[in-house]
């Protein structure tokens, strides 16, 4: 029971002080201040007993009769028992005073005022426990909702990775197959870059966030593969200052955005696909020239949507912005 006194002592003291002021006003002539002070100290003990009773009752009823099952019955029982206990307590004090010690002149007004004060105290204590219960349930439901959204977004994001990786792997193996005969040394370098990429994906597929430094290092290996595959038909310029490299980002974000640009746009040596990676405020941006392929049958159009959902639960204070104009397509991702 010391837990109750330790946790709620401030509220009990405030209630005792309220009682002191109440008695000082109502019993101004009948009760000297020193007696009021003694009663105030004693009332702290009485409040502790009452609070302990309500605490035990509240814990018991939470298990046997939660608010969700029958709200009216639960409130009636909890408050009714509390009022009975408080009325028994305060009227016992009045009885002892009237027949034994008589340190206070008691009339009907005093009895009514005393019972009214303890009624307010009982309602306040119950209001506190009821509010605490529903606040805990609300917080619990909110936590479950956030966790469910995060889990859903992560599953969707992993599905996106699983959709992109086989497509990327197929293209990479096709390129590697041609290099083996044309340029074995270049094929070996290509294979090492491919190994770096999949090692990174395997290392971080369970991580919510990685440093921007790690993501940019990974991106260099990925861009080396694209350079081998498309040569002069593709280019990527990265302009990110060193002051940003310790910030966090969802792993493989930049690879997905660049792969998205490669997947959806035409490119040739005469009209290369130019991609830019740069900072704008607290956002890292991926911008590409827009020359959409005419027949893109493999696009599921949910990749960016899943990425936005993941960032929404990972960083609720930020969001992923998409700017789609006639000439350019830009995705702005917040650094965390």
Image (spheres, rainbow, N blue to C red):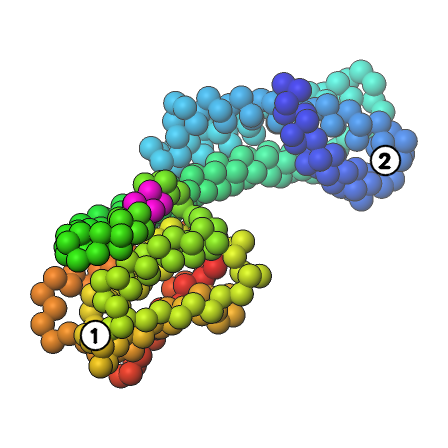
Q: Which residue is found at the position 73% from the left and 23% from the top?
A: 45
Q: Which residue is found at the position 65% from the left and 30% from the top?
A: 7
Which callout, 1 or 2, points to the residue nearer the camera? Answer: 1
Left or right of residue 306, residue 250 in this image: right
Residue that mark 1 sits on: 267
Residue that mark 2 sits on: 30
Q: Which residue is found at the position 47% from the left and 69% from the top?
A: 239
Majority secondary structure of magenta residues? helix
Residue 183 location in percent, x, y? 21, 56
Foreground of the two, 210 or 334 = 210
Residue 197 is inside the magenta segment: yes
Q: Is residue 143 above or below residue 238?
A: above
Residue 16 location in percent, x, y? 74, 34
Neighbourhood count class around disc 1 (C-alpha, 10 Å): few under 14, some 14–19, many 20 upward: some
Residue 4 is inside the magenta segment: no
Query: Which residues fall within the magenta stretch?
Result: 195-200
Foreground of the two, 203 or 161 = 203
Total marks drawn?
Answer: 2
Q: CA distance from mark 1 to mark 2?
A: 96 Å
């Amino acid at each position: 029971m010391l837990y109750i006194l330790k946790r709620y002592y401030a509220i009990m003291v405030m209630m005792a002080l309220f009682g002191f002021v109440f008695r000082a006003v109502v019993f101004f002539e009948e009760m000297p201040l020193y007696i009021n002070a003694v009663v105030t100290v004693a009332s702290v003990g009485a409040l502790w007993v009452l609070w302990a009773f309500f605490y035990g009752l509240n814990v018991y009823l939470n298990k046997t009769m939660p608010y969700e099952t029958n709200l009216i019955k639960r409130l009636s029982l909890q408050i009714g028992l509390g009022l009975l206990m408080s009325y028994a307590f305060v009227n016992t004090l009045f009885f002892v005073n009237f027949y034994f010690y008589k340190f206070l002149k008691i009339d009907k007004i005093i009895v009514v005022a005393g019972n009214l004060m303890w009624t307010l105290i009982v309602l306040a204590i119950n209001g506190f426990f009821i509010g605490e219960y529903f606040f805990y349930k609300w917080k619990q439901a909110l936590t479950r909702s956030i966790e469910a959204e995060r889990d859903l977004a992560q599953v969707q994001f992993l599905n996106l990775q699983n959709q992109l990786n086989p497509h990327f792997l197929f293209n990479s193996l096709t390129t590697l197959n041609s290099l083996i005969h044309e340029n074995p040394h270049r094929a070996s370098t290509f294979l090492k870059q491919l190994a770096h990429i999949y090692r990174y994906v395997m290392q971080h597929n369970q991580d919510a966030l990685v440093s921007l430094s790690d993501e940019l290092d990974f991106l260099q290996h990925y861009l080396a593969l694209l350079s081998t595959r498309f040569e002069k038909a593709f280019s990527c310029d990265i302009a990110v200052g060193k002051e940003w490299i310790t910030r966090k980002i969802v792993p493989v974000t930049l690879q997905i955005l660049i792969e998205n640009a490669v997947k959806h746009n035409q490119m040739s040596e005469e009209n290369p696909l130019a991609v830019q990676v740069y900072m704008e405020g607290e956002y890292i941006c991926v911008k590409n020239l827009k020359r959409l392929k005419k027949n893109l049958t493999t696009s599921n159009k949910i990749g960016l949507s899943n990425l936005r959902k993941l960032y929404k639960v990972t960083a609720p204070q930020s969001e992923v912005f998409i700017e789609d104009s006639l000439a350019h397509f830009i995705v702005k991702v917040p650094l965390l």
